Amino acid sequence: NAGVTQTPKFQVLKTGQSMTLQCAQDMNHNSMYWYRQDPGMGLRLIYYSASEGTTDKGEVPNGYNVSRLNKREFSLRLESAAPSQTSVYFCASTDSATNEKLFFGSGTQLSVL
Amino acid sequence: SQQGEEDPQALSIQEGENATMNCSYKTSINNLQWYRQNSGRGLVHLILIRSNEREKHSGRLRVTLDTSKKSSSLLITASRAADTASYFCATDYTGGFKTIFGAGTRLFVKA
């Protein structure tokens, strides 16, 4: 039972490069989320998808785009990476419309030079 | 920001002692959750308390919720070195579809 799988685990980019972070869950969850975690700031919500076919902005969406490819997969794209996007990125999912009990992936550590 | 705030930011105790962490939030909530994060790992759900509940227990964990003060506390009894981690409160706001996390409390339990 894999749960939430994120790839890659580590990535180094140069300023201006683009990349896509992949996330997949095998729990048949409706809702999926992307968070970033910076030291001393906890987790901040970037984008979320309440159900297949819908996406919405969170607290810090600027510089990111997302795609809910199907019920299992939710990707996060950085079109033109900036040093301010250096962070640890977490994908999460939940099966409840009330957002109870998020299940998290193990994270992607991204450095933008 | 609708972020909850944990207090203290860091806590260091001896094994066997109790650890108490507090969380305050800003607006009406559906529920409040506590998560644990071990270094370099993703967050793991510990316990959820609904807005109409005042106290909940799970093993060595005790959570209280005071909606009039918009605050919650997490008590870990008889702490162990393995409890060393960061602990986050997370709130699901009424009318929202997002779970918002606080900045966390770093707990260090000395053996």
Image (cartoon, rainbow, N blue to C red):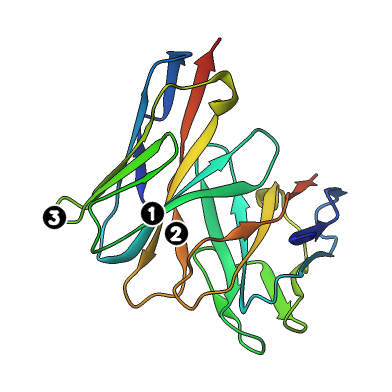
Snapshot quadrant of residue A74: bottom right
Mark-to-mark CA distance, 3 and 1: 18 Å
**Residue for badge 1:** B3
Tags 1 and 2 both on a single chain: yes
- Who is closer to the viewer here, B55 or A49? B55
N-terminal of the two: label 1 or label 2?
Answer: 1
Amino acid type at circle 3 is Ser
Q: Secondary structure at mark 3?
A: loop
Amino acid type at circle 1 is Gln
What chain letter is assigned to the residue under label 3? B
Residue A52, position as x, y percentages in the image: 66, 86
Tags 3 and 1 both on a single chain: yes
Q: Secondary structure at mark 1?
A: loop
Q: Is residue A53 left or right of residue B72?
A: right
**Residue for badge 3:** B68
Tags 2 and 3 both on a single chain: yes
Q: Is residue A18 left or right of residue B82?
A: right
- Residue A69, visible in the rendered structure: yes
Residue B38, position as x, y percentages in the image: 63, 35
Mark-to-mark CA distance, 2 and 3: 19 Å
Mark-to-mark CA distance, 1 and 2: 6 Å
Instruction: Count residues near mark 3 (Cα–Cα under 10 Å), then give few for <14, some for 14-19, many for 20+.
Output: few
What chain letter is assigned to the residue under label 1? B
